[in-house]
Image (tube, grey):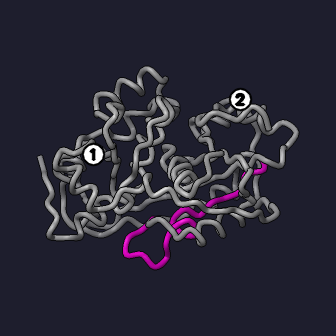
Amino acid sequence: MSPTPPPLVTADELAALLDGAPDDVRVVDASTRLALAGEGEPYTATPARDGYLAEHVPGAVFADIPGAFSDPDARFAFTLPSPSRFAAAAAELGIGDRTHVVAYDTGGSAWATRLWWLLRTFGHDGVSVLDGGLGAWKAAGHPVESGEVAVPAATFTPRLRSDLVATTDEVRRLGSGTGVLVNALDPATFRGESETSPYSRRGRIPGSRNLPRDTLLDPATGRFLDLPALAEKLQAAGILDGQRAVAYCGGGIAATVPAFAAFLVSGAEVAVYDGSLSEWTADPALPVETG
């Protein structure tokens, strides 16, 4: 496979990449649905396998992000799995050490960028995101197929990059002004004013700035904004100023969108606070801000 695909690929670029069905490319549907239960009650996450079975990019396999690609014994949903668990889940999807992965989803790209972040966190740089997901693929006139796709298992060697994972202790220090801490949720949730909140307490981590993940996407197409527009928004949030930057959200999913955008724009490595507000607000000793 040459040249190496860029971090963000268009539908037409993916179609060209798949021409001839190369063995070293694996397309992965990471779609997941979230349902809000009630005040202070965690989201319910459901892998959107039924949607995948109905239609997907030809040859794509399905990744169960809240299941196979998360720690089943963790207190909070979507927690980073162990290296061995991740390696087994990736290998089962035919993702090997030399496989180039193209991830997509059907809802806002955050699940695709979560898989992008997971792969890179475990040392696999050969990964791209399909710009606009399945919607953009269909809008470009490319075909879809239905049913399960069977692929041979591969061998994935995990190499954990701890610099891409922020701990609670580091986030506490960043909130005191030693770096940049960015909240990727909507403004109402950032202020603690959403109609219903799934977190133990309302509010944000003190010292954080708001960069809603949706503002990095074109609302009409679901595709990422062009590079100058992305750079402007990231710069305004302080992510590209050379300091240590950490993104967080509710459970480490939406936070991967600004992390991906920063890498796309300048190669900046933005860490993700995996536990995010789910972990932070559950500890009464940790402060929150509202308003």
Q: How many marks?
A: 2
Callout 1: helix, strand or loop?
Answer: strand
Q: Decide if residue 58 is on the left or right side of residue 285.
A: right
User: Residue 164, labelled with which disc?
Assistant: none
Which of these two is toward me, 35 or 179? 179
Instruction: Identify residue type, mark 1.
Output: Leu
Label 2, residues with CA under 10 Å away: few <14, some 14-19, many ≥20? some
Measured along the vertical axis of the image, is residue 206 above or below residue 36? above
The stretch in magenta equals 58-78
Left or right position of 182 against 59? left
Direction bottom: furthest residue: 73
- Nearer to me, 199 or 79: 79
Q: Position of residue 86 (x, y in %)?
A: 59, 66
Amino acid type, callout 2: Asp
Q: Does the magenta segment cover residue 256?
A: no
Q: Secondary structure at mark 2?
A: helix
Relative image position of residue 232 (x, y in whole percent):
36, 23
Q: Main secondary structure of the magenta part?
A: loop
Residue 181: which disc? 1
Mark 1, Cα crowd under 10 Å, few <14 / some 14-19 / many 20+, is many
Above/below status of 231 relative to 191: above
Q: Residue at x 74, y 51 (%)?
A: 98
Left/right of residue 170 with respect to residue 131 in the rendered view: left
Residue shown at the point (58%, 48%) measured from the top left? 105
Q: Which residue is mark 2?
A: 12
